Amino acid sequence: KQEVTQIPAALSVPEGENLVLNCSFTDSAIYNLQWFRQDPGKGLTSLLLIQSSQREQTSGRLNASLDKSSGRSTLYIAASQPGDSATYLCAVNVEQYSGAGSYQLTFGKGTKLSVIP
Amino acid sequence: GAGVSQSPRYKVAKRGQDVALRCDPISGHVSLFWYQQALGQGPEFLTYFQNEAQLDKSGLPSDRFFAERPEGSVSTLKIQRTQQEDSAVYLCASSSGQGIYHEKLFFGSGTQLSVL
């Protein structure tokens, strides 16, 4: 069974700092990996999706990398801002025997980020 | 609609009551997912619909949980004889593409269910 772990569980940084969030997964047979942001009392917002054949994806100040063979992904946030404060979740789409993805995403517990002004 | 809408926003139920949670996906979205998120945990998959067909219900924790999407748009998640362990936020998500790709996935704000 695929398990997703996110470290650290919580992180507090001063505004302007660059930071890295980590995600590891136990089964390297993944179809794609996605990073989400969750604000308190709200649903999830998709940030970046990396296909299994890709090494990284970038969107603005965010960069996500994927090392499928080692079962790791990182989310890099440059020049952090107070508005980045939220919980960041990593989710894996397991590859089926057919080579296609599955209907289920397996999520980690998230990293709660606080950016201090 | 502008986004995925879920109702009610909060639901308090006495143990043993039946509850029904509603999800209005973005208009025209083919795929609809339900997830359960316990406090301090990541979301856990419950079930998936492609239009009106329920293609994966392997995440439903027991036969007390039932989901439907009869006309391929609005979906209802029903929980019978609620138990305290059912207390969680129930999230609905939709996308325009096929469910196996999980691209451009839009989540609602969820229904927070508390079972007393």
Image (cartoon, rainbow, N blue to C red):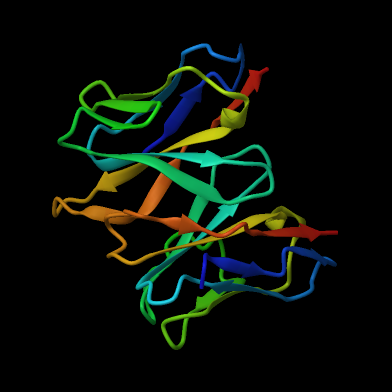
The total number of labels drawn is: 0
Residue at left 52%, top 65%? Answer: B3
Most foreground residue, A55 or A81: A81
Q: Is residue A98 above or below residue B74?
A: above
* Quadrant hosting residue A116: top right
Q: In the displayed structure, would residue B87 be above or below residue B19?
A: above
- Kindly tell me whether residue A1 is visible in this rendering: no
Q: Is residue B97 above or below residue A33?
A: below
| Position of residue B42 in the picture relative to residue A51 (left or right) | right
Instruction: Please tell me which residue is depicted at 15% across the width and 36% down the height of the picture.
Output: A53
Tell whether A80 sits left or right of B95. right
Q: Nearer the viewer, residue B72 or B63?
A: B72
Residue at the location (61% across, 59% down)? B90
Looking at the image, which residue sits at the far bottom?
B71
Left or right: A47 as drawn, with respect to A27:
right
Q: Residue A16, how many percent across, how many down? A: 54, 13
Residue placed most toward the observer, B92 or B61: B92
Counting from the top left corner in percent of width and height, residue B88 is at 68, 53
Q: Residue at x 44, y 88 (%)?
A: B71
- Residue B104 in the figure: left or right of residue B112: left
The image quadrant of residue A55 is: top left
Looking at the rendered image, the quarter that the C terminus of chain A falls into is top right
State which quarter of the image contains the N terminus of chain A: top left
In the depicted view, which residue is nearer to us: A103 or A73? A73
Percent position of residue A44, x then y: 53, 48
Residue B48 visible: yes
